[in-house]
Amino acid sequence: MSSTSTRDVEEATSTPDSDPAHNFVTCIYTTKLADALHSTTVTWAKTVISHTLYMTVEDDDDRHYTCKIDLKTWQFWGKKGLKSFQVADTRVDVFWDLRNALFAASPEPASGYYVAMVSQEEVVLLLGDQKSEALKRARARMREEARLVHKKEIVFAKKCFCTKTTLGQERREHSIMIESALAGPYDPEMWISVDGVESIRVPNLHWRFRGNETVVVGNVFVQILWDVHDWLYSANHSGVGIFVFRRCRDQKESFWDFLHDRPVFSLAFCHFLYAWMTE
């Protein structure tokens, strides 16, 4: 991968201390390419003037190979395409169709699209809800499904932050909602709900702006960590709150146990959420 592409990806996925000029969603998958396991990073990045998809494959020698797709185009036909790149000596094709894609606040489409990464007539990574259309167009068979092991994103809101993530035993996504009450005559509070059910309530937030609790989602222990210091003590209650959602084996397992494993090949899924509170 060229140095220019490396800088592009790093800039798209940085999490600066000041209010960022872009938002992004990054997912890391374990994929099997040419009979070897690889870490594949997918980043949807959006600014005022650009909307870009990066797909980066990392090999055992820490070499990175990136395919960059410009999604902000005025031509309707430009939302469907094919692009190829090399991973060492292996050709990889990326097929995409976002002509009917629906977007919410996230730079990642919510539905109505597909992105397929294909090598040697096998689909090694398939994104979106139009899987049959992707397989038909790529004329490839589906390999074993790639495993999502890490997710990182930025979300902007005034009081209520929403995201979706994979937490339970199955691959289905769960809806996460984070709400807070920071102003008024009462002590600041925060609520975290999973699939519409309140899972964590944090009173006295001015004392408990950092903490963690373990909840059960789909018969799986999920540890939720938070740091919302900047929400409370920065100017106008703006700034970033950091949340981590991760599967764990039991209630006693700590986050530091997880950090000792290499995230890409660890069995524990982990989701980092940077919640930027705006005025």
Image: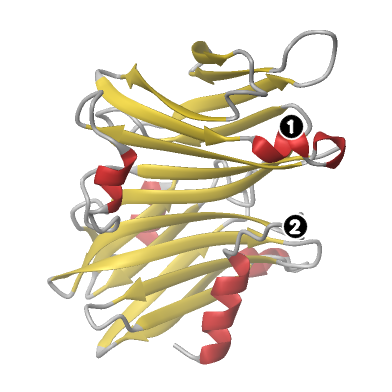
Residue contact between numbered discs 1 and 2, judged by CB atoms under 8 Å: no
Quarter of the view holding residue 169: top left
Left or right: where 29 falls relative to 253? right
Quarter of the rendering occupied by the N terminus:
bottom left
191 vs 64: above or below = above
221 vs 51: above or below = above
Residue found 71% across the figure and 63% down from its top = 76
Residue that mark 1 sits on: 232
> Three-letter amino acid code at disc 2?
Ser
Q: Quick one: 111 or 198, which is closer to the camera?
A: 198
Residue found 54% across the figure and 76% down from its top = 68
Q: Is residue 266 visible?
A: yes
Image spot of residue 272 (x, y percent): 48, 45
Quarter of the rendering occupied by the C terminus:
top right
Quarter of the view holding residue 143: bottom left
Image spot of residue 25 (x, y percent): 55, 53
Q: For residue 47, which numbered disc appears in the image?
A: none
Residue that mark 2 sits on: 18
Q: Quick one: 193 or 5, which is closer to the camera?
A: 193
Left or right: where 212 falls relative to 156? left
187 vs 70: above or below = above
Q: Quick one: 230 or 169, which is closer to the camera?
A: 230
Precedes in sequence: disc 1 or disc 2: 2
